[in-house]
Image (spheres, helix red, strand yellow):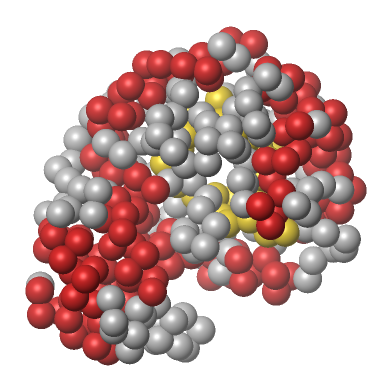
Amino acid sequence: MLSKIKSLTLAPMEGVVDFAVRDLLTRFSGFDLCVTEFLRVSQTLLPERSFYRLCPELQTNQGKTPSGVPVRVQLLGNNPDYLAENAVRAIELGSHGVDLNFGCPAKTVNNSKGGAVLLQEPEVLYEIVKAVRNAVPQPHVVSAKIRLGFDDARLFHANVDAVNQAGASSLAVHARTKAHGYKPPAYWFEISRIIDKVDMPVIANGEVWSVADAENCLSQSGCQHLMVGRGALAMPNIASVLRHNAVQLTWLEAIEVLIAYADLEIDHDKGLYYGNRVKQWLRYLKIHFPQASDLLLSIRKLHDKNQVLQHLTSLH
């Protein structure tokens, strides 16, 4: 158990951590907060249905997962005014604060001047955070997520200062640049250089797959707050392992998670989570469970949900 962890957040992962995954992962105690995939804001106030599609928890459980973990809507864009009005709507619909995405490395997002590309313009970060902070009433949280930089980390301190001076409630730092993508290592030590220069909690993120990684991350970054993304898919009960000294799931218990995932009913459709989504999760599980490689090979040509479920159940 890592007593140094003051809070543990499930990271936003576009195309991966949707509300179904949030539900499954927060069934294991230890997470204090979940952040949604990003909601892209371009030129208008988005309709309520856009928020509900991204975050059904707003309609079903007062903005919390079925296990009671608060969920925060994340917004992505570059227009301060549009982001501000959509942030207010998110709060009005029940989001537990609003998060601003300045870290997405995807080319399609960056080419539209969203995500990590904004790390080249600290003044834009300031304008966005300031506008959202002014629009969202206290004490609601306005948080931000950044990387160390775009091509390099030269503007890291300037970006952190911009977010801090604009009044953000907290800042999550993915300890890699956009150019690094998701290639190891994560440069946790870079976070230690700014942590004493800001008035807000700083959350360390990136390359935390195990207890040892978490210990090294906290030690090198100087943080007391941690955000985990891919590591939670590789070890579904990582929150309990880190917070409550739980034992890592067995392979059979991991299969139970996959069975639950494959059989979820979403919008009255029990076929949404068949095939590729299960295979995607297995690619992460391979990190801690060698058996996942063989299972992935055995279902690679299966697309029907019932076939996938039958195969998973036969292993259980």
Residue 175, relative to residue 255: is it above or below? Answer: above
Near-viewer residue (285 or 201) = 285
Count of numbered labels shown in the rendering:
0
Asked if residue 47 can be seen in this view, the reply is yes
Near-viewer residue (282 or 72) = 282
Q: Which residue is rendered at x = 24% and y = 88% of the image?
A: 307
Q: Which quarter of the image is occupied by the N terminus?
A: top left
Near-viewer residue (31 or 145) = 145
Q: Which residue is rendered at x = 25% and y = 32% of the image?
A: 211
**Quarter assignment of residue 26:** bottom left
Q: Which residue is rendered at x = 51% and y = 53% of the image?
A: 13
Residue 99, relative to residue 18: is it above or below? Answer: above
Asked if residue 164 can be seen in this view, the reply is no
Q: Which residue is rendered at x = 60% and y = 14% of the image?
A: 194
Q: Which quarter of the image is occupied by the C terminus?
A: bottom left
Residue 292, relative to residue 148: is it above or below? Answer: below
**Quarter assignment of residue 279:** bottom left
Where is residue 162 shown, x and y percent of the image?
77, 24
129 left or right of 259?
right
305 left or right of 199?
left
Where is residue 314 shown, x and y percent of the image?
10, 80
Where is residue 231 shown, x and y percent of the image?
35, 45
Where is residue 309 shown, x and y percent of the image?
23, 82
Residue 124, relative to residue 95: is it above or below? Answer: above
